[in-house]
Amino acid sequence: MLGGYKGKFSVLPYYQKIQEYNNYESRDLWEYKLNFSKNEIKMLELLLWEVGWTYIDYYYLDDNCAYVMLALLEAAKPDLFLTNKALIYAIPSDTIRIVDNIPNFVTNVTYRPSVLSRYVTKVALLNNTESIILKNIVENNNILENTFSNCDKYCKANVIDSKLEFIDYKEKLVGSNDLVKYGKLRHTLLLSRAKDAVKLEKIENKPQSNPPHIGHDSGMVAMSVGSVLAESYFTELQWRPALHNYEDSDLGYSNSLGIGFLDTTFRYNVTDKKFELRKFHLLEIMSLPKNLENIEFLAWHFDLGLENNFGFNEKAKYERGYLKFGVGATLFGEENNRFFYSLLHLDTGYSRNFGWHFGPNFLFGYVEQINSKIKFIVTTELGNRFNKNNITLSSESKAILSYYISRNFSVQLSYLNKNSENEAKLT
């Protein structure tokens, strides 16, 4: 799970990797042009040739491809001192920020849209008639005699170009790969497009996200003070070495994807003078993608960890380990600055007080980016856990208001009702 296998080097044509990431994996790419002299580029080529026959012991946290990239750049240009800036672990987005922080080293940043982003851009420019025609072609997987009867040659060109991007996304075309499902239709569309010989204005593919170097650092440390209302006061310390969740600023990240690793929260109850591990997420992934025209995605959530305060009412004092996996749907607003999601989970776990248990868990949430500095989140979670003797209910409602002071600093005010216990917290 942590790595330990052989990491091998390979030297490939640049366009192959572009196709792999842009087309096969539908990833947007940000290309950073570096200020290397010709001699330094030659040195880098020689280094890659030299290590091409060997391997490294690959680990996900430190000795990974991101760290090796820093080492290679540093070997070609020793005065950069890059590797000593990756102190404990190396995460790709952090290594980009390390490189970007070197004065005058990054000379240009270029956006390369994925095939999916190109499709999104083209579809957004279609008028209502063109959108209907495109939908009919997608549903029928064919062109009928009257498909373009109410469409001039420019309308037809817009629809065909959009459909070609749709096919390329679905087929994950890379290099000379053969088409599996849409081969005949793609050939027909290309012939029809060439026959009309229509030249459309060049479309500017605006970035669907911000460049990663402007995002917050991957590691997070948070200090909190709060009160369990009418009962006690507490302080909390939270540490998350990686990476991001949707409570954080979206700059440089997706607003619908969260990945947390080793996310740990300790609490000290000032009133009771009690110290405890409040929660621990070994790994948590939340994917809440936006459905696109003619393309639907499944929202999903995975969470493996430990939690305290499990149970209901006076029984809400259990500790337990758990594994949750859920699927659902997401509904975005027109401006993409707000979305609602719902997920149905299967929750399994073990508690010394309650034994092995499982059951359904429903999660509902609303997220709104009010402006570039303020985000508001509301979530509600309802669960039922069963074992051979008992049923334990669980309910949790939370409201969060975040204010982003700068790239790496924010203030958060939250209110939580969990299993009939109310608390307020400032982080």
Image (spheres, rainbow, N blue to C red):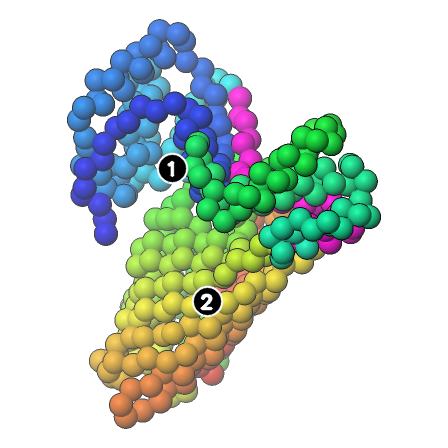
The kind of residue on which mark 2 rests is Val
Please, which residue is most extreme toward the top here? 39
| Residue 402 locus on image (x, y percent) | 56, 56
The kind of residue on which mark 1 rests is Pro
Location of mark 1 (residue):
92
Q: Which mark is residue 234?
A: none
Comparing labels 1 and 2, the label whose residue is closer to the camera: 2
| Residue 125 locus on image (x, y percent) | 73, 42
Q: Is residue 127 visible?
A: no
Residue 256, above or below 168: below
Residue 341, above or below 207: below
> Residue at 54% across / 27% down in the picture?
110
Using a 10 Å C-alpha cutoff, classify the residue at mark 1 as few (fewer than 14 neighbours), some (14 to 19) or many (20 or more). some
> Residue at 27% across / 43% down in the picture?
60
Q: Is residue 412 left or right of residue 351?
A: right
Secondary element at tag 2: strand
Looking at the image, which is closer to me, 180 or 339? 180
Over which residues does the magenta segment extend?
108-135
Instruction: Verify whether residue 131 appears in magenta.
Output: yes
Q: Is residue 43 left or right of residue 185?
A: left
Q: Is residue 341 left or right of residue 81?
A: right
Location of mark 2 (residue):
327
Please, which residue is most extreme toward the bottom here? 389
Looking at the image, which is closer to me, 210 or 172? 172
